[in-house]
Image (cartoon, rainbow, N blue to C red):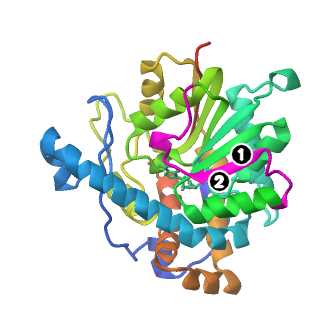
Amino acid sequence: MTSAFQTSYSPLPYFLRTGLFSPSPTPRLSVSFPSSYTRTCQSHPRFMSTPANASASTTSDVRALQDGIAEFYDESSGLWEDVWGDHMHHGFYDPDSNVSGSDHLSAQIRMIEESLRFAGISEDPAKWPKRLVDVGCGIGGSSRYLARKYGAKCQGITLSPVQAGRANVLAKAEGLADMVSFQVADALKQPFPDGQFDLVWSMESGEHMPDKAKFVNELVRVAAPGGTIIIVTWCHRDLGPHEESLQPWEKKLLNRICNAYYLPEWCSTADYVKLLQSLSLQDIKAADWSQHVAPFWPAVIRSALTWKAFISLLRSGLKTIRGALVMPLMIEGYQKGVIKFAIITCRKPE
Ligand code: SAH
Protein backbone atom coordinates (compact mmCIF):
# COMPACT_ATOMS: atom_id res chain seq x y z
CA MET A 1 0.00 0.00 0.00
CA THR A 2 2.67 2.49 0.94
CA SER A 3 4.60 2.09 -2.28
CA ALA A 4 1.77 3.61 -4.29
CA PHE A 5 1.74 6.61 -2.00
CA GLN A 6 5.45 7.07 -2.14
CA THR A 7 5.54 7.59 -5.90
CA SER A 8 6.30 10.94 -7.44
CA TYR A 9 5.90 13.18 -4.40
CA SER A 10 8.00 16.09 -5.53
CA PRO A 11 10.09 18.28 -3.19
CA LEU A 12 8.08 21.08 -1.66
CA PRO A 13 8.70 24.08 0.51
CA TYR A 14 8.83 23.00 4.14
CA PHE A 15 5.52 24.55 5.13
CA LEU A 16 3.79 22.72 2.28
CA ARG A 17 5.31 19.39 3.18
CA THR A 18 4.40 19.63 6.82
CA GLY A 19 1.16 21.54 6.59
CA LEU A 20 2.60 23.83 9.26
CA PHE A 21 0.58 26.72 7.94
CA SER A 22 -2.28 25.65 10.09
CA PRO A 23 -5.44 27.47 9.06
CA SER A 24 -7.55 29.32 11.57
CA PRO A 25 -10.26 27.22 13.18
CA THR A 26 -13.77 27.11 11.78
CA PRO A 27 -16.72 25.79 13.78
CA ARG A 28 -16.94 22.06 14.25
CA LEU A 29 -20.27 20.44 13.73
CA SER A 30 -22.48 17.86 15.20
CA VAL A 31 -23.34 14.82 13.14
CA SER A 32 -26.51 12.92 13.86
CA PHE A 33 -25.64 9.29 14.11
CA PRO A 34 -27.15 6.62 16.24
CA SER A 35 -25.26 6.87 19.52
CA SER A 36 -23.13 3.85 18.72
CA TYR A 37 -21.59 5.70 15.80
CA THR A 38 -18.12 7.14 15.93
CA ARG A 39 -17.30 10.82 16.10
CA THR A 40 -14.26 12.68 14.89
CA CYS A 41 -13.49 16.37 14.35
CA GLN A 42 -15.59 16.90 17.41
CA SER A 43 -13.88 18.69 20.18
CA HIS A 44 -15.78 21.95 20.30
CA PRO A 45 -17.17 22.52 23.80
CA ARG A 46 -20.55 23.61 22.44
CA PHE A 47 -21.20 20.08 21.30
CA MET A 48 -20.51 18.70 24.69
CA SER A 49 -23.57 20.53 26.02
CA THR A 50 -27.04 19.16 26.58
CA PRO A 51 -29.12 18.14 23.57
CA ALA A 52 -31.54 21.05 24.10
CA ASN A 53 -29.02 23.84 23.66
CA ALA A 54 -26.84 21.77 21.31
CA SER A 55 -29.50 21.85 18.61
CA ALA A 56 -29.70 25.67 18.64
CA SER A 57 -25.96 26.03 18.19
CA THR A 58 -26.01 23.30 15.59
CA THR A 59 -28.38 25.28 13.37
CA SER A 60 -26.23 28.39 13.30
CA ASP A 61 -23.04 26.38 12.94
CA VAL A 62 -24.49 24.42 10.05
CA ARG A 63 -25.27 27.75 8.41
CA ALA A 64 -21.70 28.94 9.05
CA LEU A 65 -20.32 25.72 7.58
CA GLN A 66 -22.50 25.95 4.49
CA ASP A 67 -21.60 29.61 3.95
CA GLY A 68 -17.95 28.59 4.21
CA ILE A 69 -18.42 25.76 1.69
CA ALA A 70 -20.18 28.08 -0.75
CA GLU A 71 -17.48 30.74 -0.43
CA PHE A 72 -14.69 28.17 -0.69
CA TYR A 73 -16.05 26.80 -3.98
CA ASP A 74 -17.07 30.23 -5.28
CA GLU A 75 -13.48 31.29 -4.79
CA SER A 76 -11.57 28.21 -5.90
CA SER A 77 -13.60 26.61 -8.71
CA GLY A 78 -12.28 28.86 -11.48
CA LEU A 79 -8.68 28.03 -10.63
CA TRP A 80 -9.46 24.34 -10.39
CA GLU A 81 -11.19 24.41 -13.78
CA ASP A 82 -8.24 26.24 -15.37
CA VAL A 83 -5.71 23.74 -14.11
CA TRP A 84 -7.69 20.49 -13.88
CA GLY A 85 -10.85 20.88 -15.96
CA ASP A 86 -14.45 20.23 -15.03
CA HIS A 87 -14.12 17.21 -12.71
CA MET A 88 -13.47 18.18 -9.11
CA HIS A 89 -12.81 14.67 -7.84
CA HIS A 90 -9.99 12.16 -7.46
CA GLY A 91 -8.80 10.08 -10.38
CA PHE A 92 -8.93 6.27 -10.31
CA TYR A 93 -5.50 4.79 -11.06
CA ASP A 94 -4.01 1.34 -11.21
CA PRO A 95 -1.96 0.93 -8.05
CA ASP A 96 1.79 1.30 -8.64
CA SER A 97 1.31 2.61 -12.17
CA ASN A 98 3.44 5.46 -13.41
CA VAL A 99 1.14 8.34 -14.20
CA SER A 100 2.11 10.96 -16.70
CA GLY A 101 0.59 14.45 -16.65
CA SER A 102 -2.03 13.89 -19.31
CA ASP A 103 -3.47 10.77 -17.67
CA HIS A 104 -5.29 12.60 -14.91
CA LEU A 105 -8.41 13.55 -16.85
CA SER A 106 -8.81 9.97 -18.02
CA ALA A 107 -8.31 8.82 -14.42
CA GLN A 108 -11.14 11.14 -13.34
CA ILE A 109 -13.39 9.75 -16.07
CA ARG A 110 -12.36 6.29 -15.02
CA MET A 111 -13.48 7.13 -11.47
CA ILE A 112 -16.97 7.73 -12.86
CA GLU A 113 -16.92 4.55 -14.93
CA GLU A 114 -15.57 2.37 -12.09
CA SER A 115 -18.24 3.77 -9.78
CA LEU A 116 -21.01 2.89 -12.22
CA ARG A 117 -19.54 -0.58 -12.70
CA PHE A 118 -19.19 -1.15 -8.96
CA ALA A 119 -22.81 -0.14 -8.44
CA GLY A 120 -23.90 -2.61 -11.11
CA ILE A 121 -25.47 -0.10 -13.51
CA SER A 122 -26.47 -2.19 -16.48
CA GLU A 123 -24.71 -1.96 -19.85
CA ASP A 124 -28.05 -2.70 -21.46
CA PRO A 125 -29.44 0.57 -22.90
CA ALA A 126 -32.97 -0.56 -22.03
CA LYS A 127 -31.96 -0.46 -18.35
CA TRP A 128 -29.96 2.77 -18.35
CA PRO A 129 -31.02 5.41 -15.86
CA LYS A 130 -33.24 8.08 -17.39
CA ARG A 131 -33.39 10.61 -14.58
CA LEU A 132 -30.37 11.47 -12.49
CA VAL A 133 -29.53 13.78 -9.64
CA ASP A 134 -25.96 14.94 -9.02
CA VAL A 135 -25.79 15.85 -5.34
CA GLY A 136 -22.89 18.26 -4.78
CA CYS A 137 -22.36 18.73 -8.50
CA GLY A 138 -19.37 21.10 -8.64
CA ILE A 139 -19.36 22.64 -12.10
CA GLY A 140 -21.32 19.69 -13.44
CA GLY A 141 -18.61 17.46 -14.91
CA SER A 142 -20.29 14.22 -13.80
CA SER A 143 -23.76 15.43 -14.80
CA ARG A 144 -22.75 16.25 -18.35
CA TYR A 145 -20.79 13.02 -18.69
CA LEU A 146 -23.67 10.89 -17.38
CA ALA A 147 -26.32 12.76 -19.37
CA ARG A 148 -24.36 12.12 -22.56
CA LYS A 149 -23.54 8.53 -21.73
CA TYR A 150 -27.11 7.56 -20.92
CA GLY A 151 -29.08 10.15 -22.88
CA ALA A 152 -30.57 10.99 -19.49
CA LYS A 153 -31.94 14.11 -17.85
CA CYS A 154 -29.80 15.27 -14.98
CA GLN A 155 -30.29 17.86 -12.26
CA GLY A 156 -27.37 19.03 -10.21
CA ILE A 157 -27.27 20.84 -6.88
CA THR A 158 -24.43 22.70 -5.21
CA LEU A 159 -24.11 25.27 -2.44
CA SER A 160 -21.95 27.50 -4.62
CA PRO A 161 -23.74 30.06 -6.85
CA VAL A 162 -20.57 30.43 -8.92
CA GLN A 163 -20.48 26.69 -9.58
CA ALA A 164 -24.19 26.48 -10.47
CA GLY A 165 -23.82 29.42 -12.88
CA ARG A 166 -20.71 28.01 -14.51
CA ALA A 167 -22.27 24.54 -14.79
CA ASN A 168 -25.28 25.98 -16.63
CA VAL A 169 -23.03 27.98 -18.96
CA LEU A 170 -21.01 24.86 -19.80
CA ALA A 171 -24.18 22.83 -20.35
CA LYS A 172 -25.42 25.42 -22.83
CA ALA A 173 -22.04 25.67 -24.56
CA GLU A 174 -21.97 21.88 -24.98
CA GLY A 175 -25.52 21.73 -26.34
CA LEU A 176 -26.86 19.98 -23.26
CA ALA A 177 -29.07 22.72 -21.85
CA ASP A 178 -32.26 20.75 -22.45
CA MET A 179 -30.86 17.71 -20.61
CA VAL A 180 -28.95 19.04 -17.63
CA SER A 181 -29.60 21.90 -15.25
CA PHE A 182 -28.02 23.15 -12.08
CA GLN A 183 -29.20 25.11 -9.09
CA VAL A 184 -28.09 26.22 -5.68
CA ALA A 185 -29.71 23.91 -3.14
CA ASP A 186 -28.90 22.03 0.03
CA ALA A 187 -28.36 18.28 -0.22
CA LEU A 188 -29.92 17.96 3.23
CA LYS A 189 -33.15 19.59 1.98
CA GLN A 190 -33.30 18.74 -1.67
CA PRO A 191 -35.77 20.69 -3.82
CA PHE A 192 -37.19 17.53 -5.39
CA PRO A 193 -40.29 15.45 -4.73
CA ASP A 194 -39.95 11.88 -3.46
CA GLY A 195 -39.00 9.01 -5.76
CA GLN A 196 -37.73 11.03 -8.73
CA PHE A 197 -34.38 9.63 -9.79
CA ASP A 198 -33.18 6.29 -11.19
CA LEU A 199 -29.62 7.22 -10.28
CA VAL A 200 -28.66 9.29 -7.25
CA TRP A 201 -25.04 10.34 -7.62
CA SER A 202 -22.89 11.87 -4.91
CA MET A 203 -19.27 12.18 -5.98
CA GLU A 204 -17.09 13.57 -3.17
CA SER A 205 -19.72 15.71 -1.52
CA GLY A 206 -20.67 13.49 1.45
CA GLU A 207 -17.61 14.60 3.41
CA HIS A 208 -19.09 18.12 3.56
CA MET A 209 -22.38 16.97 5.09
CA PRO A 210 -22.78 17.87 8.75
CA ASP A 211 -25.56 15.35 9.29
CA LYS A 212 -24.78 12.06 7.56
CA ALA A 213 -28.10 10.46 8.54
CA LYS A 214 -30.08 13.33 7.03
CA PHE A 215 -27.85 13.25 3.96
CA VAL A 216 -28.44 9.55 3.38
CA ASN A 217 -32.17 9.91 4.12
CA GLU A 218 -32.45 12.61 1.44
CA LEU A 219 -30.57 10.49 -1.09
CA VAL A 220 -32.98 7.65 -0.40
CA ARG A 221 -36.06 9.87 -0.42
CA VAL A 222 -35.40 11.29 -3.90
CA ALA A 223 -34.42 7.89 -5.36
CA ALA A 224 -37.10 6.17 -7.44
CA PRO A 225 -38.16 2.67 -6.33
CA GLY A 226 -35.47 0.35 -7.70
CA GLY A 227 -33.13 3.34 -8.17
CA THR A 228 -29.40 3.14 -7.48
CA ILE A 229 -27.56 5.34 -4.99
CA ILE A 230 -23.82 5.91 -5.39
CA ILE A 231 -21.82 7.65 -2.67
CA VAL A 232 -18.11 8.18 -3.31
CA THR A 233 -16.60 9.97 -0.36
CA TRP A 234 -13.77 10.57 2.06
CA CYS A 235 -14.06 8.53 5.24
CA HIS A 236 -11.87 7.86 8.22
CA ARG A 237 -10.73 4.29 8.80
CA ASP A 238 -13.16 1.83 10.35
CA LEU A 239 -12.69 1.48 14.08
CA GLY A 240 -11.49 -1.77 15.59
CA PRO A 241 -13.91 -3.84 17.71
CA HIS A 242 -12.54 -2.41 20.96
CA GLU A 243 -12.02 1.15 19.80
CA GLU A 244 -14.39 3.94 20.84
CA SER A 245 -12.81 6.58 18.64
CA LEU A 246 -9.77 7.42 16.56
CA GLN A 247 -6.43 8.07 18.25
CA PRO A 248 -5.79 11.70 19.34
CA TRP A 249 -3.11 12.18 16.66
CA GLU A 250 -5.53 10.93 14.02
CA LYS A 251 -8.22 13.35 15.16
CA LYS A 252 -5.70 16.18 15.13
CA LEU A 253 -4.71 15.41 11.56
CA LEU A 254 -8.33 15.28 10.39
CA ASN A 255 -9.20 18.46 12.28
CA ARG A 256 -6.58 20.39 10.36
CA ILE A 257 -8.03 19.11 7.09
CA CYS A 258 -11.57 19.92 8.27
CA ASN A 259 -10.61 23.49 9.00
CA ALA A 260 -9.20 24.13 5.56
CA TYR A 261 -11.77 22.28 3.46
CA TYR A 262 -14.94 23.18 5.36
CA LEU A 263 -15.63 19.66 6.51
CA PRO A 264 -17.59 18.68 9.59
CA GLU A 265 -16.67 15.55 11.50
CA TRP A 266 -15.80 12.47 9.48
CA CYS A 267 -17.33 9.04 9.69
CA SER A 268 -16.16 5.62 8.61
CA THR A 269 -17.30 3.49 5.68
CA ALA A 270 -18.82 1.10 8.21
CA ASP A 271 -20.93 3.99 9.54
CA TYR A 272 -22.38 4.60 6.08
CA VAL A 273 -23.09 0.90 5.66
CA LYS A 274 -24.89 0.82 9.02
CA LEU A 275 -26.96 3.84 8.00
CA LEU A 276 -27.99 2.18 4.75
CA GLN A 277 -28.76 -1.07 6.54
CA SER A 278 -30.95 0.79 9.03
CA LEU A 279 -33.02 2.02 6.07
CA SER A 280 -33.47 -1.51 4.67
CA LEU A 281 -31.79 -0.74 1.38
CA GLN A 282 -30.81 -3.54 -0.96
CA ASP A 283 -27.51 -4.70 -2.49
CA ILE A 284 -25.46 -2.60 -0.10
CA LYS A 285 -21.80 -2.70 -1.13
CA ALA A 286 -18.72 -0.79 -0.05
CA ALA A 287 -15.06 -0.75 -1.00
CA ASP A 288 -11.88 1.02 -0.04
CA TRP A 289 -10.34 2.60 -3.14
CA SER A 290 -7.56 4.45 -1.30
CA GLN A 291 -4.85 2.63 -3.23
CA HIS A 292 -6.48 3.59 -6.51
CA VAL A 293 -6.40 7.31 -5.74
CA ALA A 294 -2.84 7.45 -4.38
CA PRO A 295 -1.28 9.40 -7.28
CA PHE A 296 -3.94 12.12 -7.13
CA TRP A 297 -2.81 14.52 -4.39
CA PRO A 298 0.87 14.45 -5.38
CA ALA A 299 -0.30 15.39 -8.88
CA VAL A 300 -2.50 18.21 -7.57
CA ILE A 301 0.44 19.59 -5.59
CA ARG A 302 2.72 19.37 -8.61
CA SER A 303 0.14 21.18 -10.72
CA ALA A 304 -0.01 24.00 -8.17
CA LEU A 305 3.74 24.46 -8.40
CA THR A 306 3.86 25.73 -11.95
CA TRP A 307 4.37 29.50 -12.00
CA LYS A 308 1.06 30.17 -13.74
CA ALA A 309 -0.94 28.07 -11.28
CA PHE A 310 1.02 29.42 -8.33
CA ILE A 311 0.30 33.05 -9.27
CA SER A 312 -3.38 32.23 -9.90
CA LEU A 313 -3.48 30.47 -6.54
CA LEU A 314 -2.13 33.53 -4.76
CA ARG A 315 -4.70 35.70 -6.56
CA SER A 316 -7.65 33.44 -5.90
CA GLY A 317 -7.96 34.20 -2.21
CA LEU A 318 -7.25 33.06 1.29
CA LYS A 319 -9.61 30.10 1.42
CA THR A 320 -8.05 28.60 -1.70
CA ILE A 321 -4.54 29.15 -0.37
CA ARG A 322 -5.48 27.52 2.92
CA GLY A 323 -6.86 24.56 0.96
CA ALA A 324 -3.61 24.25 -0.97
CA LEU A 325 -1.52 24.33 2.18
CA VAL A 326 -3.16 21.27 3.70
CA MET A 327 -2.89 19.10 0.59
CA PRO A 328 0.15 17.30 2.03
CA LEU A 329 -1.98 16.29 5.00
CA MET A 330 -4.30 14.39 2.66
CA ILE A 331 -1.29 12.41 1.46
CA GLU A 332 -0.21 11.81 5.04
CA GLY A 333 -3.72 10.74 6.01
CA TYR A 334 -3.83 8.15 3.23
CA GLN A 335 -0.28 6.95 3.90
CA LYS A 336 -1.01 6.44 7.58
CA GLY A 337 -4.31 4.70 6.86
CA VAL A 338 -6.45 7.29 8.67
CA ILE A 339 -8.18 8.52 5.51
CA LYS A 340 -10.03 6.09 3.30
CA PHE A 341 -11.40 6.81 -0.13
CA ALA A 342 -14.68 4.94 -0.06
CA ILE A 343 -17.44 3.94 -2.42
CA ILE A 344 -20.76 2.87 -0.95
CA THR A 345 -23.64 1.85 -3.18
CA CYS A 346 -27.13 0.40 -2.76
CA ARG A 347 -30.54 0.08 -4.35
CA LYS A 348 -33.86 1.37 -3.10
CA PRO A 349 -36.41 -1.45 -2.87
CA GLU A 350 -39.04 -1.53 -5.66
N1 SAH B 1 -19.16 16.15 -7.49
C1 SAH B 1 -18.40 17.21 -8.10
C2 SAH B 1 -17.88 18.25 -7.11
C3 SAH B 1 -17.19 17.75 -5.85
S1 SAH B 1 -16.68 19.13 -4.82
C4 SAH B 1 -17.32 16.63 -8.97
O1 SAH B 1 -17.02 15.45 -8.83
O2 SAH B 1 -16.79 17.36 -9.83
C5 SAH B 1 -17.93 19.11 -3.54
C6 SAH B 1 -19.26 19.67 -3.96
O3 SAH B 1 -20.21 19.42 -2.91
C7 SAH B 1 -19.32 21.18 -4.20
O4 SAH B 1 -20.01 21.43 -5.39
C8 SAH B 1 -20.13 21.71 -3.02
O5 SAH B 1 -20.88 22.89 -3.28
C9 SAH B 1 -21.05 20.54 -2.80
N2 SAH B 1 -21.72 20.53 -1.48
C10 SAH B 1 -21.16 20.47 -0.26
N3 SAH B 1 -22.12 20.49 0.69
C11 SAH B 1 -23.31 20.56 0.05
C12 SAH B 1 -24.66 20.63 0.46
N4 SAH B 1 -25.01 20.62 1.75
N5 SAH B 1 -25.61 20.71 -0.48
C13 SAH B 1 -25.31 20.72 -1.80
N6 SAH B 1 -24.05 20.66 -2.27
C14 SAH B 1 -23.05 20.58 -1.35
Q: Is residue 35 above or below residue 253?
A: above
In the rendering, which numbered label is found on residue 90? 2
Q: Residues within 10 Å of mark 1 (few under 14, many from 20)?
A: many
Residue 27 seen from this side:
yes
Q: Decide: marks 1, 2 in contact (CB < 8 A)?
A: yes
Q: Nearer the viewer, residue 223 or 292?
A: 223
Residue shown at 42% from the left, 20% from the top: 278
Q: Locate residue 263: give its quadrant.
A: bottom left
Query: Would residue 268 be found to the left or right of residue 346 on screen?
Result: left
Distance between mark 1 and mark 2 Cα atoms? 7 Å
Q: Nearer the viewer, residue 346 or 222?
A: 222
Q: Position of residue 234 (x, y in %)?
A: 51, 47
Provide the residue span drawn in magenta.
173-194
- Quarter holding the C terminus? top right
Which amino acid is tagged 2?
Answer: His
Q: Position of residue 86 (x, y in %)?
A: 72, 60
Q: Residue furthest top?
A: 350
Query: Would residue 83 be found to the left or right of residue 73 on screen?
Result: right
Residue shown at 86% from the left, 21% from the top: 126
In reply to whether residue 44 is colored magenta, the answer given is no
* Residue to which mark 1 is pinned: 111
Dot 1 or dot 2, earlier in sequence: 2
Residue 42 seen from this side:
no
